[in-house]
Amino acid sequence: MNLDSNSDPHRLSLIKISDQTKLKINTQIGMNRSKQRFDNFEQALLQLREALLIANPSLIELAGSIKLFELAFELGWKTIKDILEQENLFKNEIISSPRRVIKIAVQCHFLEEAEGQIWLEALDNRNLLVHTYNYGFAEQCKNEIHYTYYPLLEKLLAKVKSNFYE
């Protein structure tokens, strides 16, 4: 069998993929990745909800609920990033910082100003929880997670679900 591309005109056409086709393929892969991330975000929120319903959590349960918050928060800001990318709101800028994503989301009116402030506060607390463990701080953050951050994440879930992934 001769594999020389010059001997088979069809082989050459299979190798050459137009830039438009590459863009379509990359866009489809990106959309699938975004949808998968959103689905994971939804699952993380369901698990966080269950953890927050525990009335008097043990130390281990508290640590687990904090980890679930960290996961849900991470998937939440990355979901925002995916949507802003799909809407071409980064203007060819490569953004990898959650703080920058949140600020752009506020500038683009994807998030309200007050929401953006809470997202930034949640980011700061998430960073403190990840890098230092203090039971008193964790206990204090549990209330913030339950009554402030969890509803914020639920609001994002509802917004994205109704506007992007119906």
Image (cartoon, helix red, strand yellow):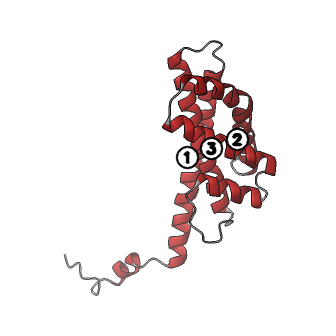
Q: Residue furthest left?
A: 1
Residue corresponding to mark 2 = 157
Which is nearer the N-term, disc 3 or disc 1?
1
Q: Is residue 106 visible?
A: yes
Which is nearer the N-term, disc 2 or disc 1?
1
In this rendering, the label closer to the viewer, 3 or 2: 3
**Quarter of the image holding residue 145?**
top right
**Quadrant showing the N terminus:** bottom left
Q: Taking 66 as reference, is 154 left or right? A: right
Q: Is residue 50 above or below residue 99?
A: above
Label 2 Cα neighbours within 10 Å, binned few <14 / some 14-19 / many ≥20: some
Q: What mark, if any, has residue 123 been given in the picture?
A: 3
Q: Is residue 162 visible?
A: no
Q: Is residue 96 above or below residue 41?
A: below
Question: What residue type is disc 1 on?
Answer: Gln
Residue corresponding to mark 1 = 36
Question: What residue type is disc 3 on?
Answer: Leu
